[in-house]
Image: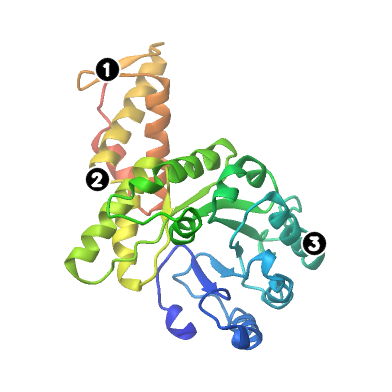
Amino acid sequence: MLEKSRGLNVDCIAYDLEDSVTPSKKPEARKALAKFLNQPRATGIRENAVRINAVESGIALDDLSEVLKAPNLDTIVVPKVNSASDLHFVTDVIRHTLPSRHPTVPSSSSSDAPAINILALIESAKGLSDLSSICKASPYLSGLIFAAEDFALDLSITRTPSLSEFLYARSAIATACRAHNLPSTIDLVCTSYKGDAGQRTLEEECLGGKGLGFNGKQLIHPSQVEIAQRAFAPSDDEITWAVRVVIGDEKADRQGRGAWTLDGRMIDAPVVGKAKSIVSKAEACGYDVSAAREKWKDQEPE
């Protein structure tokens, strides 16, 4: 299973030491995972993450002591984060074990390993109510993940196809990430993945999460990857609009015009900012933005 995962083409893959490993197998799993992450990096995986056991479990330190030895570990996923103290504990262990991979330590060469990241899973009402403190708890923190199933269990609610019961929690998490400049805002798992119906459900959930401000989604099967990547990447129409706005605004700026119109709609600073963000995301997704700029080079501010 571990070796098979190396063939994926994904932004981040998270190897689990929590729910998918029985208590008696956890020591074995830790050692196997640490050894696995000593291999050369897989070309299609940009971030290697490990979900450790919750701090409250009492065995998080055992997980961290083993997996932090792996040179190709990028991110620690911390489950059941209910307060800032959970991240304080993980932060102290990382700082003590890998002081050279602290976010404030500059790399002396391109071969130096980058800073370790933390992703925090929000799974309870307590965690949701303490988002502000959690977001400020660690310099390693790079994002939040919404764990819908555990959240539903905590609140004694039932997940429905509309996901309306999670609207407040999802909006709060996405807003908190943006307020604290955390780059990763990861939405709930789609438990449907088989057949056309499952794929449609996944696409609908991805687009719904994107509309709430999430920029990624947890996936549980390789068949979900392509659909999620396509949904969260800018569409061709979005990129075309964004490039036209950026080019038009460059010309408007030279003309001393702070606001102008495109296709009958007003373009001002917030709209331009959104367009630039889409262009940057398109570039990150490998889209040939230069070709689009060439196509629309004659775009004029109306």
Q: Distance between the residues labelled 1 and 3?
A: 52 Å
Q: Which residue is drawn at 28% across and 68% down?
A: 193
Q: How far apart are marks 2 and 1 (CA)?
A: 21 Å
Residue assigned mark 2:
236
First of labels 2, 1 by sequence position: 2
Judge depth for marks 1 and 3 and give the one in front.
3
Q: Is residue 121 left or right of residue 83?
A: left
Label drawn at residue 99: 3
Image quadrant containing the N terminus: bottom left
Q: Position of residue 249 (x, y in %)?
A: 36, 23
- Quarter of the image for residue 79 reads bottom right
Numbered-mark total: 3
Q: Position of residue 217 (x, y in %)?
A: 41, 57
Q: What kind of element bears circle 3?
A: helix
From what the image shows, is residue 8 above or below residue 188?
Answer: below
First of labels 2, 3 by sequence position: 3
Residue assigned mark 1:
261
Q: How far apart are marks 2 and 3 (CA)?
A: 43 Å
From what the image shows, is residue 250 above or below residue 238?
Answer: above
Q: What kind of element bears circle 2?
A: helix
Asked whether the beta carbons under mark 2 and mark 3 sit within 8 Å of each other, the answer is: no
Q: What kind of element bears circle 1?
A: strand
Can residue 268 be seen here? The reply is yes
Label drawn at residue 36: none
Label 3 neighbour load within 10 Å: few <14, some 14-19, many 20+? some
Q: Give, as a three-letter code, the residue at label 2.
A: Asp
**Foreground: 122 or 151?**
151
Judge depth for marks 2 and 3 and give the one in front.
3
The extreme front residue here reads 156
Can residue 138 be seen here? The reply is no
**Foreground: 259 or 159?**
159
Q: Where is residue 154 in the image (x, y as percent from the top left)?
A: 51, 57
